[in-house]
Amino acid sequence: MEEMVCIECPNGCVLTVENKDGEIIVGNYKCKKGITFAKTELLSPKRTISSIVRTVFPDIPVIPVRVSGDIPKDRIFDVIEEINQIRLDKRVGRGHIIIDNVLGLGVNIIATSSILINT
Amino acid sequence: MKEYDVIIIGGGPAGLASAISAKDEGKDILLIEREVRLGGILKQCIHDGFGLLRFNEKLSGPEYAEKYIDIFNEKKIKALTLTFVTEIVKEENGFTVSVVNRDGVTNLHTKTVILATGCRERTARQIFIHGTRPSGIFTAGTAQAFVNIYGQKPTKKCIILGSGDIGLIMARRLTLEGAEVKGVYEAKPTPSGLTRNVHQCLNDYNIPLHLSHTVTRVFGNSRLTAVEVSRVDENMAPIKGTEQIIECDALILSVGLIPENELAETLGAKLNERTKGPVCDNLYMTSVDGLFSCGNALHVNDLVDYVSENAAEAGKAAANYIKSERKLLEFSVGENLLYIVPQSIELESDLSAVTVYFRSSGDFNGKKFTIKVNGDTVFEKKYAFLRPPEMEKLVIDMNKFNLNMNSRIEFSII
Ligand SMILES: Cc1cc2nc3c(=O)[nH]c(=O)nc-3n(C[C@H](O)[C@H](O)[C@H](O)COP(=O)(O)OP(=O)(O)OC[C@H]3O[C@@H](n4cnc5c(N)ncnc54)[C@H](O)[C@@H]3O)c2cc1C
Ligand code: SF4
């Protein structure tokens, strides 16, 4: 039996994971999200990431961004590389899509603050 | 002199939530913030994980804060930014608050004050390290501001001392920015941060966590060039012969947060030894009549969701405050509890849904959070596990306990 920390919420349940004849049995979860997490984590782990993009505006040199949905864990650095290429020259607000369908992963890079328009 | 019902000091999530709920009670509100923008520390917390409890969404810090700022603006609540509170004086029927900003010095009068000034990080001065005093030693929060607000890279190769959540978050953040984080060193035998952060911020990036280790010496003249780390014994004393030199250009500190309570102290509010914030009752009123406290100024909440929640309650209580004789029943803190908030209840208030926050003093499995009144158990709840970094919250109907001024009410984990 394997132990695994669920990272879906601050509870951080220490799940137990067992492979019984090809079926994955999950235990010790406080909610059902733990089951989904354990299965995904074994097959193809996913993560949410946040970073910043550079702007051309001297008053606000960077704005925060994140992925709009989980991405495969082994693509994190590739996505960061894409984000680092951007120089934002438009004053956009929270929720604005900065990179559409990043690397074909089916998620967008979105702005997470409106500091550029509310100054 | 301008007259308000409630003046709120601090424009972070606590100040915003308390202002919104006080305004909903139809009162005259003013919020005072020393920085240019509202939002508090969340402006620099760009990672996700905020609002899971409150919005059931994985928001980043700025998104969470801006949701509240939007509501704050819709309700046309008055705010003074870039404004410092220089003094608060308690008077017969309220407080005079002196502020200074571009318009000069102004005196304002208010019936009640809510302190929502947040917390600050412990710094190098509060921990003892031998050696020179080079630059390159700063807190995880400072590193966070450098990277996330100013877009600068404060280090190429660093170590982190202390395993608080902000340190763990910054270990990941700096790694994503191309820096090498050589390890996180924690003097205690267990991590201070959430298990989930150890997992997703360190393990995911193969950053080693060295428990029972501390930094014993720093090297470098103008800039840090290396640190010496040592293993510590169970009394946290460094063990001779275990020293190791690690080359790095930065030592990042994540050794804890403490409530910012300078203003509370000048007003003579009693502080709680355990939380390091002011003592308060179930209405979030401190020992000073009409002075309220909430958010991280009251006690360090690790989740902003809880901050917004207790701040909203504080805002409502402050808006409805009417001066009267207080009938406070103090709680006693028994076995295995690190702290409990509030520390007393107002017997004249509505006791049907009293919110209680607590932390255990150690790691426990299968123990019960227990309330005893005059020695009889009146409430218990079993927890599969309790750990000091993970704060717990309960809403309890205390009407059922038939409390009076002579009752003895004790909380413990047994
Ligand atoms: C560096 C750092 C990183 C953190 N990261 C996280 C995290 O990732 N996740 C999380 O859930 N929590 C985090 N926290 C905890 C965080 O403090 C709370 O979640 C939340 O921001 C607390 O809200 P608050 O309103 O109580 O305090 P704050 O957000 O700190 O807001 C306090 C506000 O009061 C203002 N202020 C203070 N004194 C005065 C004065 N005298 N006059 C006028 N204004 C004043 C400050 O400028 C500030 O805007 C972090 C804390 C720190 C210090
Ligand atoms: S199992 Fe549910 S409660 Fe436990 S950490 Fe995962 S999401 Fe949170």
Image (cartoon, rainbow, N blue to C red):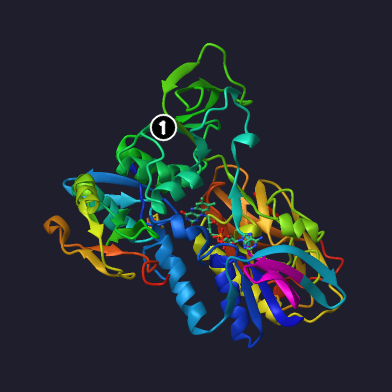
B137 left or right, relative to B127: left
Q: Can residue A68 be seen in this view?
A: no
Three-letter residue code for mark 1:
Cys
Q: Quadrant of ligand 2?
A: bottom left
Q: What stretch is highlighted in magenta?
A: B97-116
Observer-nearest of B239 and B249: B249
Q: Nearer the viewer, residue B62 or B333?
A: B62
Q: Mark 1 points at which residue?
A: B158
Q: Which residue lies furthest to the front in this view?
A: B103
Q: Residue B153: give x, y in percent of width and height.
A: 37, 42
Indicate the secondary structure of the residue bearing disc 1: strand
The percent position of residue B23, horizontal first and vertical second, equals: 60, 83
Q: In which quarter of the image is residue B187?
A: top right
Q: Quadrant of the N terminus of chain B?
A: bottom right
Whether B220 is drawn above or below A8: the answer is above
Which residue appears at 55% of the width and 33% of the height?
Answer: B188
Residue B374 position, x and y percent, is 80, 61
Q: In which quarter of the image is residue A101?
A: bottom left
Q: Is mark 1 within 8 Å of ligand 1?
A: no
